[in-house]
Amino acid sequence: MRYVVIVAFCVLLQSCVAQSKSRLIDASQETITKEVFDYYLYFPENYEADSDEKFPLLLFLHGGGESGDSLIAVKRNGPPKLIARGKQFPFLILAPQNPHKRKWWNTQALIQLLDTIVTEHKVDPKRVYLTGLSRGGGAAWEMVVQYPKRFAALAVVCGMTPLPYASWIDKKMPIWVFHGEEDKSIPISESQTMVDRLLSMGYDVKFTKYPGVGHDSWIQAYNTEELYDWFAEQSRKD
């Protein structure tokens, strides 16, 4: 009897398998991603006095260490740090905070924030600049790949690079890259390979290397006064 039961079960199982078939269906679903950014927005001294003038804007993306829910952390590095110390700039500076400590920047949400700021303030859309350090540098590279016609100039400090998509970047947009030669977090080879690829394709790229400097090359980079003069000279050449 036990043998008969086993045979009957095997026959039944084989029958079920034979009747089952794989399927491929067509479907679609709309998804909604919501992001909340806290941010600093700096206005130059003559912003209110020149009522009809439109100003350049610099979008600054911080590194992973400043991510989270305490906006004051954004003042640790880059232009926000310099502003807190009293430095004045000739353009608006938008410095949002990535609310996620262990997530990449949401670049799609960033471009929406940028659009809102440009629309609601006296910003010249042909003079929007982009810079970022470390994780924010990687996001800056990503943004010029995905939105190649949006920015007049790019400066990246020790950021990961989208090497396979280098050719997607607008060839008319000048680029300045900074990196410490002793960087153990994101090796200088990351920037060197990207710069070499861009130069081989005829891009306008400057590369500043800091001998003996590790991952915090942003200290020297953002204290480079020439960087801000360079930004101020750029305008979209569409």
Image: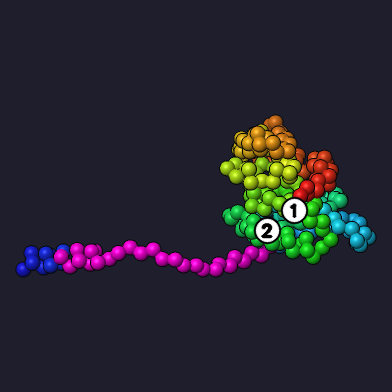
**Which image quadrant is residue 13 in?**
bottom left
Question: Is residue 46 shown above or below 162?
Answer: below
Where residue 147 appears, as percent x and y from the top left, is 67, 53
Range shown magenta: 11-37
214 and 199: which is toward the camera: 199
Q: Which residue is mark 2?
A: 110
Which amino acid lies under the numbered mark 2 shown in the image of this protein? Leu
Q: Is residue 16 left or right of residue 97?
A: left
Badge 1 element: strand
Percent x, y for residue 113?
Answer: 71, 61
Q: Does residue 165 appear anywhere in the picture?
A: yes
Residue 59's label in the rendered image is 1
SS type, badge 2: helix
Q: Amino acid at mark 1?
A: Leu
Identity of the residue drawn at 73% across and 61% down: 115
Magenta: main secondary structure: loop
